[in-house]
Image (cartoon, rainbow, N blue to C red):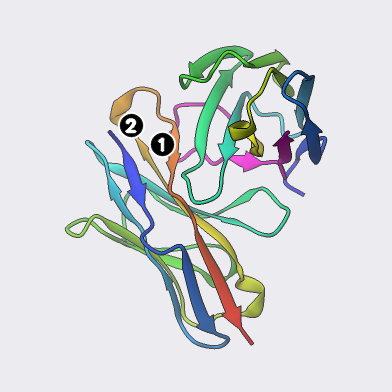
């Protein structure tokens, strides 16, 4: 176990649904991230939070809405998604952002299918 | 802009043979390079990193990587492959000059070790 827990593991939703992905880290880290993993594409950095403040929004469509109520929890709220949004969504944490040797600790991901 | 390229989608190697997973990078400043591994149904796990110093970096599970500045490469190697090494391997780079200092990943290389 990496200390980063994501729920649910699998999610199937229609394009008109609203759902949320949850991430929790038990490592005492201050930075949390959302990445999107699609087959044969680089991992796409979506959002970065440092000490609960959003420091990066990598041109992500507004149908994805992140929330970071505290340093241990991160949510990704989903609404009116498209089939091309189907992917594995990975949450990660690190002690902080900005360090040259900073390591990321990843959760197991939520496999999302949009019908 | 920073980027990494993993030219091989798939690498097959016989158990006991040496393995190499290739990675080349592009950054504007000094590169900070990483390898992560993803086992089935799991998130990414840190393997090793190059920040400065010796060009040969040793990491977890007997893996090592060689930093070659002239060839802008950071290939992952292991002298003797195990079946349990079968996984998806990601190369990543951090360019400290960009200000965001985030990790940018490649597309991944799937390693299959054949018994």
What residue is rendered at 50% in x and 68% in y?
A: B63
Please say whether residue A42 is one of the residues in the magenta stretch: no
The relative height of residue A53 versus residue B6 in the rendered view (above or below) is above
Q: Residues within 10 Å of mark 2 (few under 14, many from 20)?
A: many
The reply to whether residue A114 is in sight is yes
Q: Where is mark 2, residue-wise?
A: B96
Q: Return the residue nearer the eye: B12 or B26.
A: B12
What residue is rendered at 28% in x and 28% in y?
A: B97
- The location of residue A85, given as percent across then percent down, is 61, 32
Pick out the residue farthest to the right. Answer: A8
The relative height of residue B41 versus residue A81 in the rendered view (above or below) is below
Q: Is residue A72 left or right of residue B50?
A: right
| Contact (Cβ within 8 Å) of mark 1 with mark 2 | yes
Q: Where is mark 1, residue-wise?
A: A100
The reply to whether residue A93 is in sight is no
Q: Is residue A115 left or right of residue A59?
A: right
Q: Is residue A67 left or right of residue A100?
A: right
């Amino acid at each position: 176990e990496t200390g980063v827990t994501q729920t649910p593991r699998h999610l199937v939703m229609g394009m008109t649904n609203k759902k949320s992905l949850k991430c929790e880290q038990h490592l005492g880290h201050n930075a949390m991230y959302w990445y999107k993993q699609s087959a044969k594409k680089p991992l796409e950095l979506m959002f970065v939070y440092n000490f609960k403040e959003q420091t990066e929004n990598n041109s992500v469509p507004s149908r994805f809405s992140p929330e970071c109520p505290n340093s241990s929890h991160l949510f990704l709220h989903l609404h009116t998604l498209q089939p091309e949004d189907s992917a594995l969504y990975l949450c990660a944490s690190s002690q902080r952002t900005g360090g040259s040797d900073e390591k990321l600790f990843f959760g197991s991901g939520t496999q999302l299918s949009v019908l | 802009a920073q980027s990494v390229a993993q030219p091989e989608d798939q690498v097959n190697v016989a158990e006991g043979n040496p393995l190499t997973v290739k990675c080349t990078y592009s950054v504007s400043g000094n590169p900070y390079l990483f390898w992560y591994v993803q086992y089935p149904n799991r998130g990414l796990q840190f393997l090793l990193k190059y920040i400065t110093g010796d060009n040969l970096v040793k990491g977890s599970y007997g893996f090592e990587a060689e930093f070659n500045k002239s060839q802008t490469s950071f290939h992952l190697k292991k002298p003797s492959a195990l079946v349990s090494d079968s996984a998806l391997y990601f190369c990543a780079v951090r360019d400290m000059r960009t200000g965001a200092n985030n990790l940018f990943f490649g597309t991944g290389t799937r390693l299959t070790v054949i018994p």
